[in-house]
Amino acid sequence: MRVLVTGGAGFMGSHAVDRLLAAGHQVTAADSLVGGYRENVDPAAAFVVCDLADRQAAADLIEASAPEVVFHYAADATEGRSQFTPLSSTDNNIVAYMNTLVPAIDQGLKKVVLVSSMSVYGAQEPPFVETMRRMPEDVYAAMKSAMEASTEHLSAVHGFDYAIFRPHNVYGERQNLADPYRNVVAIFINALLRGRAIHIYGDGEQRRAYSYIGDVTPAIVDGGLSDRSNGQIFNVGSSEDVSINQLADVVRDVFFDGGPWPAGQEPQSLPPRPLEVKNAYCSHAAAERRLGFVNATTLRAGVQAMVHWARTTGPREPAYLPNNLEIGADRAPATWVEKLI
């Protein structure tokens, strides 16, 4: 089939491109290259540099690629930062998605696979299940909730199929080590590569389930193409929930071969981040039952694979926003304002 992968030069999107190509599909990868890298994209895919927040550029992309299926990975997925960059969150989430989806529907789209987020559950009691209401706690989650609901409404009227996947805390090879605003595993590893201390917000007892890219990609790509996912929402990711403190210990053990923190690299404590949900992890029973999803990679094994890749790649200088935050810098974490990462 003709498949468009938005965010195709990014971390998750580029892995999806690889799997789609391996299955024999004709793939176009589109990316703005704000957080993605051209070298992530297999040369066998057609590649288009495109800012989907630009309505005409998105329409031109759809006309040229004529996708039967769209995998929408493109996002400004900086959840914690979205309270301080709400315009970027709006433009690069719901606006970019509508700019892509509407012309695709008009040109005969068969199915959209929307990569959403468990952030839509908000601060409900975990483990989250798909039957829970959307209760976003921040701007990013509100955008993802709107994208999901819009997909459902437009599908009901215009007759295309859809599947919605809610991955969570995904990490692994090709993650953007330069991003100082999100992806704590990458932030920790990049700091250690640069000989810097890591920072932990609050008491470090926030619980998450970190999900390895090698487990998540097959679930979204294979499941997304399956008729068994039509009209469904699925959580995908790890069920091994740990605290931030426990994650830091795993990263330390892997990075320093079981040794202690070197002097000057011990974890530094900072005040809690605004609106951060304390405990967030999911049940994956629906994906296991309907799509055969298997989470096979332990946190330690996944971190070992990522550290090996990161050492080969080398450290990256954190890429802070050139014009700082849109609003409220005085309320933002010191790591961003003072560029501590």
Image (cartoon, rainbow, N blue to C red):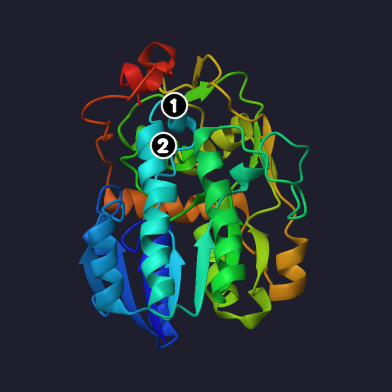
Marks 2,1: beta carbons within 8 A = yes
Q: Which residue lies furthest to the front in this view?
A: 157
Residue 120: quadrant of the picture: top right
Residue 341, position as x, y percentages in the image:
35, 26
Residue 324, position as x, y percentages in the image:
27, 24
Give the CA separation, mark 2 to mark 1: 8 Å
Q: Which of 198 and 321 is in front in this view?
A: 321
Circle 2 sits in a helix, a strand or a loop, which is it?
helix
Q: Name the residue under label 2.
A: 187
**Quarter of the figure with the N terminus:** bottom left
User: Residue type at mark 1?
Assistant: Ile
Q: Which of 281 and 75 is in front in this view?
A: 75
Residue 76, position as x, y percentages in the image:
39, 44
Task: Identify the mark nearer the N-term, 2 or 1.
Answer: 2
Q: Is residue 322 above or below residue 288?
A: above
Q: Residues within 10 Å of mark 2 (few under 14, many from 20)?
A: many
Residue at 42%, 57% (x, y): give it. Answer: 98
How many numbered discs? 2
- Number of the front mark, 2 or 1: 2
Question: Can residue 74 be seen from the camera position used here?
Answer: no
Q: How crowded is mark 1: few (under 14 residues within 10 Å), some or many (20 or more)?
A: many
Residue 148: quadrant of the picture: bottom right
Residue at 43%, 19% (x, y): give it. Answer: 333
User: Residue type at mark 2?
Assistant: Ile
Q: Name the residue under label 1.
A: 198
